Image (cartoon, coloured by chain):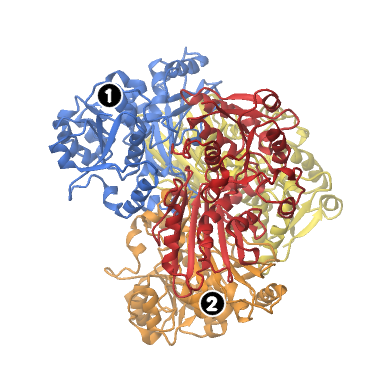
Chain colours: A blue, B yellow, C orange, D red
Amino acid sequence: VGITAGVIGHTGYAGQELINILKRHSGVEPMILEAPRGGTPSKTSRTSASKALQQARQSLAQPGDSSLRRRSLEEALAGGRPDVVFLATSVSISLDLAPRLVGAGSRVIDLSGAFRLPTAASFETWYGEAHTCPELLADAVYGLPEITRERVAGCRLLANPGCYATAANLALCPLQRSGLVDAETLVVCDAKSGVSGAGKEARAATHFCTVAENISLYGLMTHRHVPEILQTSGLTEDCFSFSTQLLPVRRGILATIYFRLRPGAQSADVGDVLHAAYADEPFVEVYPEGSFPTLTSVINTNRCHLGYAVVEPGRRTLIVAALDNLLKGAAGQAVQNLNIMLGLPETDGLLAR
Amino acid sequence: VGITAGVIGHTGYAGQELINILKRHSGVEPMILEAPRGGTPSKTSRTSASKALQQARQSLAQPGDSSLRRRSLEEALAGGRPDVVFLATSVSISLDLAPRLVGAGSRVIDLSGAFRLPTAASFETWYGEAHTCPELLADAVYGLPEITRERVAGCRLLANPGCYATAANLALCPLQRSGLVDAETLVVCDAKSGVSGAGKEARAATHFCTVAENISLYGLMTHRHVPEILQTSGLTEDCFSFSTQLLPVRRGILATIYFRLRPGAQSADVGDVLHAAYADEPFVEVYPEGSFPTLTSVINTNRCHLGYAVVEPGRRTLIVAALDNLLKGAAGQAVQNLNIMLGLPETDGLLAR
Amino acid sequence: VGITAGVIGHTGYAGQELINILKRHSGVEPMILEAPRGGTPSKTSRTSASKALQQARQSLAQPGDSSLRRRSLEEALAGGRPDVVFLATSVSISLDLAPRLVGAGSRVIDLSGAFRLPTAASFETWYGEAHTCPELLADAVYGLPEITRERVAGCRLLANPGCYATAANLALCPLQRSGLVDAETLVVCDAKSGVSGAGKEARAATHFCTVAENISLYGLMTHRHVPEILQTSGLTEDCFSFSTQLLPVRRGILATIYFRLRPGAQSADVGDVLHAAYADEPFVEVYPEGSFPTLTSVINTNRCHLGYAVVEPGRRTLIVAALDNLLKGAAGQAVQNLNIMLGLPETDGLLAR
Amino acid sequence: VGITAGVIGHTGYAGQELINILKRHSGVEPMILEAPRGGTPSKTSRTSASKALQQARQSLAQPGDSSLRRRSLEEALAGGRPDVVFLATSVSISLDLAPRLVGAGSRVIDLSGAFRLPTAASFETWYGEAHTCPELLADAVYGLPEITRERVAGCRLLANPGCYATAANLALCPLQRSGLVDAETLVVCDAKSGVSGAGKEARAATHFCTVAENISLYGLMTHRHVPEILQTSGLTEDCFSFSTQLLPVRRGILATIYFRLRPGAQSADVGDVLHAAYADEPFVEVYPEGSFPTLTSVINTNRCHLGYAVVEPGRRTLIVAALDNLLKGAAGQAVQNLNIMLGLPETDGLLAR
């Protein structure tokens, strides 16, 4: 247990899950890094003071749980910097803190979108603001382990993928790379997410009375996760339709993906490619053709479940990907990346439930 | 109030809504038709005995509400047949009763799928059973008022559309008929439904613990509503991908439809065509481009709300259709059809909320 | 339709319901009164700007609905004051506006708690702030029609009861007044409410992820509705235990009330008293002994349903009261009071669903 | 890992949780015992065949999980009987199997109500059927560890408490035993439960459309858990009012308990007694006065959280107890009892989440 791992932004949904996972991890000592006054790391950190007592109580409630160490960010940067720092923060906070942490010698795993796109220009296009540390982009590694694992090992700045992008890419990448997707026609990803994906901040859109007994389309084509899907899968924007819809559930993503099989491909290829791609993966499971995962089959796990079907006529293909947006879509995948970066067993901390 | 309207299958979800609407109708006298012993009209009629007291109480509870007349089916057929009979029954019960009712001189509005497809052969293909009264098919009119209104007036056997088909066709028909849909590529309809769409019968799939905090794909490509969509919109099966997903809500359908605009069409055409098609329709509303309906905007109404967007590059188009599966998707539309059949004001009974 | 009725605070949950009801009312012309800049009438008015488009659309969507007249408050006070003004506002706004409106000659129906308690001192005790217009208290009438109807007729300042108080008092008043309640022991009211009862403001407590799959106790003994219950029922504080719990539903209150029958009373008295008390009431229904209402039996109605049971040994009695917190618990009862005040049919506007 | 533990009724909700816990247990080897044809152990075992594939898949999905051993019940009884057998079965199945298992030398932990009451007569009174093996009752131990731990160690037939009784007794027993409860007046337990408490069988009462946006009272005074509460706490029936209400959540119990403090007792005694009673308990936490647990603070744990308040005048006292009905209310407590029976660490298997 020589590796120290700091978490900045521990009061948000993803940050809480990070803490929970790291406490179960056999090879890491977690600590909370608190930003100095006037520079709190995320919006939810500022508004969650009322939750402090409750969280303290829940920690105390867990028998045998020594409460976590807390350090100020400045202190951590000055003296004993953590070996790794997780940024469960907004894009702008990550842009501010990542250079300082990298400069101090910590490895950084960033859960925001600040380092997912390859250039400052593409960042500005999709995020609508300037990138303030473009010099870090060349070294940042996009960490979707099942697809980019070899680049994750040893990297010092890891961009943890978006939750929707993880679901879409795990479904699409093996098929697109095997040439099965007819991208001349249309590839559709109709994604549905639980409310925790919209963050912890109380807004009209997350009020119970708005969400319950309802579903609403809130992202469309221009969602920030689209470029992640395009760059990793190799699809082009003009063939890819994407929308996101808010479900009356707390957590989970279900992405339903439709495309036409490329001429010359066989229907059986879809299952063959998916099963081959994930045969040895601890966190991805491919169902038999015609069976489809639901949210409850993946919630509270770091797993992504995939179902598929190919229907004649028209070689119409459907893939369903399900995952927990806070785990395989955020904190769980971040720890999976940590394990790969540091050469630890990839499942450490991630199998407890 | 000279028109008598009988309801068979009044204990199911759609049947209950029918009763509620007909009680508000200014030109119709509703009555419940009860099937003889040993021939109860629907599955829920057999299992809902325990609800009788509750329903009786709710009727009594409504001040000024004289309880509905009840007659046995045989009695109604023998003597004073109702002018119109609604069949809120299963396909097999409808196949049994419709010929007898038509023979007795009643007009019939059938909410099952028994008379929606044009031939006995297509019925057998999609429903997996033989059609026992194919002679009625030639006279049956598919009643989606906004698209087929002129044929509804005066008809004697009306096939009320499926809930998914209503949503999909109201979105697709004007666009496809105007030549805006590129059917060479792929047209996708990702439909989501509340649990009442799965019927009142208690099954593992409708257990609260199965549905809550979950979403599951349960229909795919081969759903019985697909041929209704194809025949009414003019799309072909090989370009049309369709799936249905069960939401943790009680009622409502949201259908998200994706296609590519046909070469030569202008982006502005989509809005122009939709707005023109529905400008005078009392029950369809088209939102401004980029605004999308939610379930709560249509629940408890007979309305269908449509939103749309067209995005470059790729002329990718998205249409969202929302309606209440038990009203515009079933009982409400059935009464709308009744009004047209009999020359009554089309909105009678349907605006109370 | 000579009576004009203004609504201040039309964007809150209760205000929206008021508008909906008044549009159905046959004898009232509703209008929205908008407070001047810098003096918006309620918190939700300030934060709901983003909803304006949606609400406008919904109004437009309702066929045959001429949009409501809107006037500024100042204009309404200066020239043609409305005959009646509903204050769907916070206590402090009501304290500010009520004297001006009464002074201008309008009748006022206040949905806040500003005028429910008899003295400035009791108001300060329970609301923790000074009462700024105590001179109005003597004329204010507490309007729970089934209990205080005779005082409502003709009054000029009506205090509309709290939602919990309505449920508890309709259950308790007839029994307590008939001497059936053993107040020497303990009277318990365990009340549960949907989230709309907590208001439209987005807070951590109303975030979907906080509320779903949960229930939490949030009021206890000292809830502001307690003095309304005590003063109307005649119970004393030291025997009355009260708590409120937030349910994962959007609307509705279920109050479960426990007490011991007073020595000498007969078990059958409970049902006799309740049935006699409400035999002629259009909005209260008493179930047979041992049957209990649920939320869905009253939602979207102005009705209160009561169930009861008496169990030996110990003459333990249980009463369940269910109502819709926004209708019989707020806007519906306010219009019921309006009807009584003005001598209109008591159910006008209130039976549409 | 020499101890073998069989589970009968592994397809029900409690049985599934038992399997999950036992797989995490460091000192037990779990196995599934399958009843012979014609004698399946529980209702859900008979109706859950359709779940088999899904469950198989979920097992496979868990990396490193060797699938569980399965044996027929007859085989287990004949040859190598398990050291312990959990009966997650209905009362009648437990009455049938318990004598045979005890006779074969296995220890039995019964999750039904078959052995919770002290005499055949009391069983018949509350369960409405004859007790077929009254000779076992004398040796059966009621296993609520925090209250009856000393009797659990070494016992051979353990009656695992009911979920409601666990919540009520953990709240009431220390206070009643310390003489703080004024039982002359009225003690009220208003209990609310998630739908899994009503079992896995699909019924009208568990249909999503019945439960969502609703709450309903379904048990009253005569609930089978009442005698467990009375016998363990020492309260008498004539002072104890109890009701149960079905919440639109999947799991969890919140019990709100009201009583008056006995004359002579001090308000501070309540907290003192509760904190002292549970200071060393790993699975019970007492909150500071005025703070109350919610369902989400205990779901997926074996913990019971208690909150309390005492209010003057009237010395009215309120206790809130929250637990997960399937864990501390069933399977978790059963394993806690197993650990005590066999002298294993009491928390083994029960802290993973």
Residue A229 seen by the camera: yes
Specify whether residue B145 is in view.
no
Out of B339 and B195, give the one closest to the viewer: B195
Quadrant position of residue B308:
top left
Compute the Cα span from label 2 to label 1.
68 Å
Q: In the image shown, does B311 or C103 lie closer to the viewer?
A: C103
Residue in the image at 41% along x and 23% along y: A172
Q: Position of residue C324 (x, y in %)?
A: 54, 64
User: Which quadrant of the view contains residue B117?
Assistant: top right
Return the residue at label 2.
C144
Q: Quadrant of the N terminus of chain B?
A: bottom right
Q: Residue at x 47, y 12 (%)?
A: A264
Secondary structure under badge 2? loop
Same chain shared by disc 2 and disc 1: no
Give the number of the disc on residue C19: none
**The C terminus of chain B sits in image quarter:** bottom right
Q: Residues within 10 Å of mark 2 (few under 14, many from 20)?
A: many
Q: Quadrant of residue C69?
A: bottom left
* Left or right of C156 on screen, residue A115: left
| Subunit that carries the residue with mark 2 | C
Kind of residue at badge 2: Leu
Q: Position of residue C12 (x, y in %)?
A: 41, 63
Residues at discs 2 and 1 in contact (Cβ within 8 Å): no
Residue A192, given in percent of the width and then of the height, sits at 44, 38
- Mark 1 sits on what residue? A341
The kind of secondary structure element at disc 1 is helix
Residue C176 to residue C189: above or below: below
Crowding around mark 1 (Cα neighbors within 10 Å: few <14, some 14 to 19, many 20+) is many
C349 shown above or below B159: below
